[in-house]
Amino acid sequence: MLQILIRHGESLSNRDGRVQGQADISLTDVGRQQAKAVASWCQTQQFQSPCELWSSPLCRARETAEIIGKATGLSVNLKDDLVELNAGVFQGHLWDDLADRFPEDVTRWRSGDLDFQIPGGESRRQLAQRGGQALQSLSCRSARSIIIVAHGGILTAALGLLLGRDHPLLVEAVERPFTRLPALGNCSVSQLQWPGPELNSFNRTDHLP
């Protein structure tokens, strides 16, 4: 099975520099254009049939998936475990304000401690385990190809768990899931081959304008 992993298009919070976590935030006009571009790319690919389309239920991912579904004729299936990191007390605040508002918590988060749990939220390890289990469970379906639309934090954390944090394509990315500058670009494409899994490509954006 081939899993085509797509990060959602630019959201209002991405544009404003705000921590969104699991907040239900819509795409910007730029984000919709990015979604149309990745949808056009999906149309040109000869993914093996049967092919399915799955998405995080959060608005920014679901909107992106619906645009892909319209272009490809695929129905959108929702999977709750694909939602982004629960950002707890950080959620809704500007990235630039976090260090002033939550100095101790931000310092511990930036230390890279896998088990530091954001107050009211999740840890990196919890995020990786949830994301890894979501991708693994989808790999057991009878489809030959699955397009998965989700979020930068959960996708990079899941890949780090499944492939190892020292994978050459991931070594920098897994150190910073859920940061101001995420490892995955909006509407980037990464491809994961099962069984294995093996990472065929990571963070490709050449299909975007």
Image: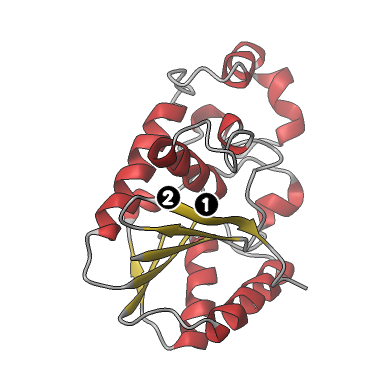
Which residue has dot 2 on it? 83
Which residue has dot 1 on it? 151
Residue 172: image location, x then y, percent: 64, 34
Residue visible at 77% across and 31% down?
A: 96
How many labels, in total?
Answer: 2
* Residue 61 tag number: none
Residue 72: image location, x then y, percent: 47, 86
- Which residue is at the far top? 104
Nearest the eye: 197 or 41: 197
The image quadrant that residue 64 belongs to is: bottom right
Task: Check the image and report above or below for 53 versus 23.
Answer: below
Dot placed on the residue nearer the N-terminal end, 2 or 1: 2
Q: Secondary structure at mark 1?
A: loop
Left or right placement of residue 98 versus residue 157 in this view: right
Q: Secondary structure at mark 2?
A: loop
Residue kind at label 1, given as amino acid type: His
Residue visible at 59% across and 34% down?
A: 171
Q: Are marks 2 and 1 in contact (CB under 8 Å)?
A: yes
Residue kind at label 2, given as amino acid type: Val
State how far apart marks 2 and 1 are (Cα): 7 Å
Task: Check the image and report above or below for 141 versus 184.
Answer: below
Residue visible at 59% across and 43% down?
A: 169
Nearest the eye: 85 or 170: 170
Task: Check the image and report above or below for 43 versus 195.
Answer: below
Quadrant of the snapshot with the C terminus: bottom right
Which class describes the residues within 10 Å of circle 1: few (<14), some (14-19), or many (20+)?
A: many
Residue 47: image location, x then y, percent: 43, 79
Left or right placement of residue 50 versus residue 63 in this view: left
Which class describes the residues within 10 Å of circle 2: few (<14), some (14-19), or many (20+)?
A: many
Residue visible at 64% across and 35% down?
A: 179
